[in-house]
Image: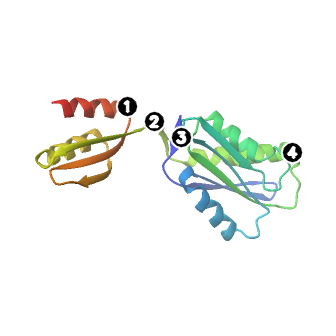
Amino acid sequence: MQILNNINFCRYEVKKSIFIAHAAPISEFDALNSSLREKHPKATHVVWAYRKLNEFNQIVENGSDDGEPKGTSAQPILNVLRGAEFVNVCILVVRYFGGIKLGTGGLVRAYSAAAKAVLNEAEVLLYEQKEEFIFSCKYAFVPRAEHFLQKLGAAFEDRTFGVDEVTWRLWLTSHQKDELKIFLDT
């Protein structure tokens, strides 16, 4: 599976209709959706679709045709996301009508092409499932732990400084978790 690290956009034109596609991590969806509606008040449609993992690690999909004929806009975007195996990614497409009707097939092709174009511009990363991991160590061990975590490529999310020890909260891949357990046992 694949994810995106940042927001990307591109412009696509078909028969004078302009499609401005945006791809982003799912965490940016709400803010991006409202900002696009503010920036493009004269746009005919703001179509969106996303795929994300829920708390049970199941894929959840949703989309909105925003007034386009049913199945001609959000569904093709979802199909592009599915085909490229993206998760935790949203695509929003702003459409300005150019005066020439595209028909249902033309809309499907246009929204699909816009979604593919914006994903081609994006920096794609492989998705790795991470789990929360909490451990504690004495203050004398902190510099060693920081060095090891940096070498491991694991950024800590939170540290709590107690009287005698420091408690770390991390999100790690299974490989990182195994490596850290070995390090802590030595």
* Apparent side of residue 73 relative to residue 135 in the rendered image (left or right): right
Task: Point out the tag, 2 or 3, that comes first from the N-terminus.
Answer: 3
Of residue 186 and residue 26, the one placed in the foreground of this image is 186
The residues bearing labels 2 and 3 have C-alpha atoms spaced at a distance of: 12 Å
Report the residue marked by disc 3: 55
Q: Which mark is residue 104?
A: 4
Q: Which mark is residue 174?
A: 1
Q: Secondary structure at mark 2?
A: loop
Residue 160 in which image quadrant: bottom left
Q: Are marks 2 and 1 in contact (CB under 8 Å)?
A: yes
Q: Residue at x 27, y 31 (%)?
A: 179
The residues bearing labels 2 and 4 have C-alpha atoms spaced at a distance of: 38 Å
**Kind of residue at disc 3:** Glu
Estimate the x, y position of residue 1 in percent, counting from the top left: 53, 34
Rendered view: 1 above or below 143: above
Report the residue marked by disc 2: 129
The residues bearing labels 3 and 1 have C-alpha atoms spaced at a distance of: 17 Å
